[in-house]
Image: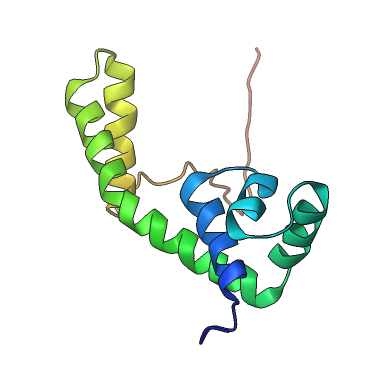
Amino acid sequence: MQSNGLTSKQKKLVDTIVATDCTIKKASEEAGYSKGESGRVTATKTLRLPHVQQYMVQLVTQSIGLNATKALRRIMHLSDNAKSEYVQLEASKDILDRAGYKAPDKVMHSHVGNISVNIDLS
């Protein structure tokens, strides 16, 4: 048992799923669960355990953080080099949005008060 409450099989199961995006059945076999359907069922139940889910969320969060710089480089490349001006514009808007410079949302303004309209049709 590890300090985070996971067994080595549980850790290997989650590590395999997050790293390879394989099926639960394949990950369960890699982690040492029974082969076939019974291993898949056991692994599926394991993945529902709160401490296993917490570890998976932690691992996914780390993975997203590590890949964020790659995604940023890609968006910047599209902003500078895409053949389509529309793609360049959308990439540029996305960069500005993520930097905190989002365009204001369009808001419908309403005015409260007495409004009088006179139309002279003569």
Left or right: residue 35 compared with residue 30 = right
Q: What colouring does the structure picture have? A: rainbow
Residue 42 x %, y %: 78, 61
In this rendering, the answer to whether 55 lies above or below 20 is: below
Quarter in which the N terminus is drawn: bottom right
Residue 30 x %, y %: 58, 53
Residue sitting at 34 percent across and 29 percent down? Answer: 90
Left or right: residue 103 compared with residue 42 = left
* The quarter of the displayed image where residue 49 is located: bottom right
In this rendering, the answer to whether 73 lies above or below 60 is: above
In front: 55, or 92? 55
* The quarter of the displayed image where residue 62 is located: bottom left
Residue 98 x %, y %: 32, 50
Left or right: residue 46 compared with residue 41 = left
Residue sitting at 61 percent across and 68 percent down? Answer: 10
* The quarter of the displayed image where residue 79 is located: top left
In this rendering, the answer to whether 39 lies above or below 46 is: above
Residue 78 x %, y %: 25, 27
Left or right: residue 38 compared with residue 43 = right
In this rendering, the answer to whether 69 lies above or below 81 is: below
In front: 7, or 61? 7
In front: 90, or 17? 17
Quarter in which the C terminus is drawn: top right
Residue sitting at 31 percent across and 36 percent down? Answer: 93
